[in-house]
Image (tube, rainbow, N blue to C red):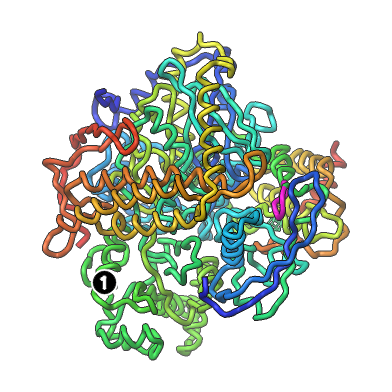
Amino acid sequence: MSEGNMNLTLKVWRQKNQKQKGELVTYPVSNVSPDMSFLEMFDVLNEDLVEKGQEPIAFDHDCREGICGMCSMFINGRPHGPKEGITTCQLHMRSFKDGDTVVVEPWRATAFPVIKDLVVDRSAFDRIIAAGGFISVNTGNAQDANALPIAKEDADKSFEAAACIGCGACVATCKNASAMLFVSAKVSQLALLPQGQPERYSRVQNMVEQMDKEGFGNCTNTGACEVECPKGISLENIARMNRDYLVAKAAH
Amino acid sequence: MALDSKIPEGPLAEKWKKYRSTVPLVNPANKRNLEIIVVGSGLAGASAAASLAEMGYKVKVFCYQDSARRAHSIAAQGGINAAKNYQNDGDSVYRLFYDTIKGGDYRAREGNVHRLSEVSGNIIDQCVASGVPFAREYGGLLSNRSFGGTQVQRTFYAAGQTGQQLLLGAYSGLQRQVGMGSVKMYTRHEMLDVVIIDDKARGIIARDMVTGKLERHFGHAVLLCTGGYGNVFFLSTNAMGCNVTAAWKAHKKGAFFGNPCYTQIHPTCIPVSGDHQSKLTLMSESLRNDGRIWVPKKQEDAEALRTRKKGPNDIAEDDRDYYLERRYPAFGNLVPRDVASRAAKERCDAGFGVNNTGQAVYLDYAAAIDRYGKIEATKQGIDASAAKIVELGKAVVKEKYGNLFDMYEQITGVNPYDEPMQIYPAVHYTMGGVWVDYNLMTTVPGMYALGEANFSDHGANRLGASALMQGLADGYFVIPYTIGAYLSNEIRTKAISTDHPAFVEAENNVKAQIDTLLNIKGTKTVDYFHKKLGKIMWDKCGMARNAAGLAEAISEIQALKAEFWKNVRVPGSADELNPELEKAGRVADFLELGELMCKDALNRNESCGGHFREEYQTEEGEAMRDDENFAYVSAWEYKAESNWELHKEELKYENIKIAQRSYK
Ligand SMILES: Cc1cc2nc3c(=O)[nH]c(=O)nc-3n(C[C@H](O)[C@H](O)[C@H](O)COP(=O)(O)OP(=O)(O)OC[C@H]3O[C@@H](n4cnc5c(N)ncnc54)[C@H](O)[C@@H]3O)c2cc1C
Ligand code: SF4
Ligand code: FES
């Protein structure tokens, strides 16, 4: 594995399962190449651990190109690490210096219990979508796609909100563990489109209700989520959702 | 067993229309009693599950990720084809059909491909209705771009995140059904076997990946929507978890495997940077719309580039070889993927590669930046300086491809707006897969395969933007009809108890395999074996193959497999989250699949699409098909370890004149 020349000290959260307590364990890693991704550095460390007869560190990942939203490491106090606008899997070792100490923890939030090591349970997000994050159209009912022109500006804004990858960094960074950025991204995507209008107000109500049930905290407008979101989801979405929510409340 | 593709009789354009309205139906009351298992929540699985649940069936969906939304369809970048002819550029259902058959090098079924083209337009309608924010023009209508192997603009897209937007659309439809209780979702579950009772698929064994518990699930039908097997090569553009396990277990229980050797090597991926490499990243084919591919004309320039004595911008225009434009003037940079990949390999093998490994070519945006900059300057009515033109051009390129350019810079540390990107071919997609008939049913009654997991529509080479189309066609518009042909005869079948001996036996087998893996306690990690297998496959069953190499590969893989079962080390236990155990199971199946792929490649004494046998090429180095002897689908039946029987499904071309594929 002697490809690079960086040496680092990792302090990684190890936790056997949901019930047992966890702790930070220190691992030295050597010969790290700046071209490696952060997760590839973990691969190398894990290979080493297995060869030494120790248990490798469990972490979530899949696409390794910043789109599936599965990777989720809290690195030196920041979700997805020191660089903005990227996910953990897109972070490369050239963002670190030889001799650095790097602390790696899982997402921390009541609504995201730790499953093992760095792996957490984010199924609350799925339940929020199931509560209303859709347009009720059965397969086969659609009209011709171009029968409904949509102003480019609206379509683009909707797309920007739809870019959310459901990673949960917004929750992890928020001192209240609020899920407002995630929920507002879906609410906004659909509220900005004509197809989303019929269910606009029931949707926001149902999704917010589910969010509260899941144990996410309240939003106190600190804006930390927007800074840490790897996809640049804007706080404007939260404002839009709040407006829609008030309208919905007033009507019902 | 004789293979029956069940293509309906009648004229091509009438087959599906007529069949669709004569397929037996299941009445709503009976649907409520019929249970369907869908393995996989990608475009194929999510769209099928949502549609079937809407129709009233009881559906269970499984995926190995922590959410259905993370299936690898999410990573598709470039776009989805549909024969809408919104650009008025002469597109039609027939043209899409024709391009797809030709693109597949005349190794796909006419009937299936025509159906795919017919429903392509409905897919776009459905996606828009469910809130997919496709790219639009200023007039508010949908925008299109071009992809390889076609001369029309029929590709719909959402920036470089088309797969993400389509999957999130299908996923939200799926979650809607979950919320209504008509779909039960099992995330972090891996299917490890199918259960067959009286020759019919009746359920699966799945492992809860968090607790390690093995579960038995009954279904009147089982749909495998488990994606492709490109990870047999270790390095590919697939996600880390993509695997063949579900398909392979089905294969070992009787489902024939179709055309396993047809692999797509994508021409534009970021080159390998070192031994630590865990996966390869695609640079979308849409980049070939505007980018120009070149290597230097002179060996000494290539040498200087490799040692960084020169940079790409130091090579004069006249000293650059735009080899695709040179060899294929009619299609230029937009030739199909197999052709573009081989051409890159040919130049690099000849010593013109441009990075330190000699395995990279340039994808250059300078001309596009200049062109767009000038257009923009004209639009804005300014008499722009050269620097201003570049600035304006970069802004346009950023809007079109910004996320891809950022991704490139993130991975390589090089700014692609200033210096051409380095690219090289990488494993990307598998045209082969579980053999299915027109109903998408495998050779096991009641078991279906959809999406990339089946072999059906792309022949020997898939055109860009056609996999998303096929996945959604299968899930939204084909299976909801064709499954009736089977389930209408199952309305009297009561749910079978999972205490049935077949379930018990299947579970015991799965448990035995897990125990064996954990108890070998050898000295080598799972990745060690996976990397070795990948290297054998890439060197001998990759972009170019020959009989001697394939024969070697087969014995090397057999030896590697034997070593794996003697010497792999899988830490941890069965009853916990154990990623190494998951990987071990997948690599065990890849080792068997790899052998079959080589066997299939060795059997096919011709070159077609992604399958290039060095012995069979024209003087200009183009693939040489042998239609007389190989116009068939290879469907392999599993007999015993390293033992398969070949069945041939003859391909008949009644509507298209089969010809040498030319993009010149
Ligand atoms: C980087 C990239 C870019 C691409 N870009 C394009 C493009 O622009 N246009 C285009 O048309 N095509 C593109 N493709 C191809 C296309 O994305 C895929 O072929 C298609 O999305 C596959 O969809 P699917 O539903 O068949 O499988 P997938 O989306 O791969 O889903 C597989 C599902 O099966 C589940 N699964 C697998 N095994 C098991 C198991 N044993 N147990 C339980 N669950 C299991 C997974 O969890 C997942 O839910 C691209 C592919 C890649 C890799
Ligand atoms: S809003 Fe941003 S941080 Fe939050 S889940 Fe979506 S992509 Fe992740
Ligand atoms: S692994 Fe998919 S976003 Fe990081």
Of residue B490 and residue B29, the one placed in the foreground of this image is B490
Apparent side of residue B461 relative to residue A22 in the rendered image (left or right): left
Which quadrant does the C terminus of chain B fall into? Answer: bottom left
Of residue B232 and residue A99, the one placed in the foreground of this image is A99
Residue at left offset 14%, top offset 46%: B626
Residue at left offset 66%, top offset 63%: A230
Apparent side of residue B295 relative to residue B486 in the rendered image (left or right): left
> What amino acid type should be assigned to the residue bearing mark 1?
Asp
> Would you name the residue on which mark 1 appears?
B349
Q: Is residue A203 visible?
A: yes
Residue B216 screen position, x and y as percent:
58, 26
Chain hosting mark 1: B
Residue B108 screen position, x and y as percent:
27, 40
Q: Is residue B224 magenta?
A: no
Is B14 drawn above or below residue A146 in the view shown?
A: above
Residue B130 screen position, x and y as percent:
58, 41
Is B366 drawn above or below residue A55 in the view shown?
A: below
Quarter location, residue B175: top right
Q: What span is in magenta?
A: A116-121
Residue at left offset 61%, top offset 56%: A53
Is A112 drawn above or below residue B59 in the view shown?
A: below
Residue at left offset 26%, top offset 53%: B552
Going by the picture, which residue comes out furthest to the top?
B492
Which quadrant does the N terminus of chain B fall into? Answer: top left
Of residue B571 and residue B205, the one placed in the foreground of this image is B571
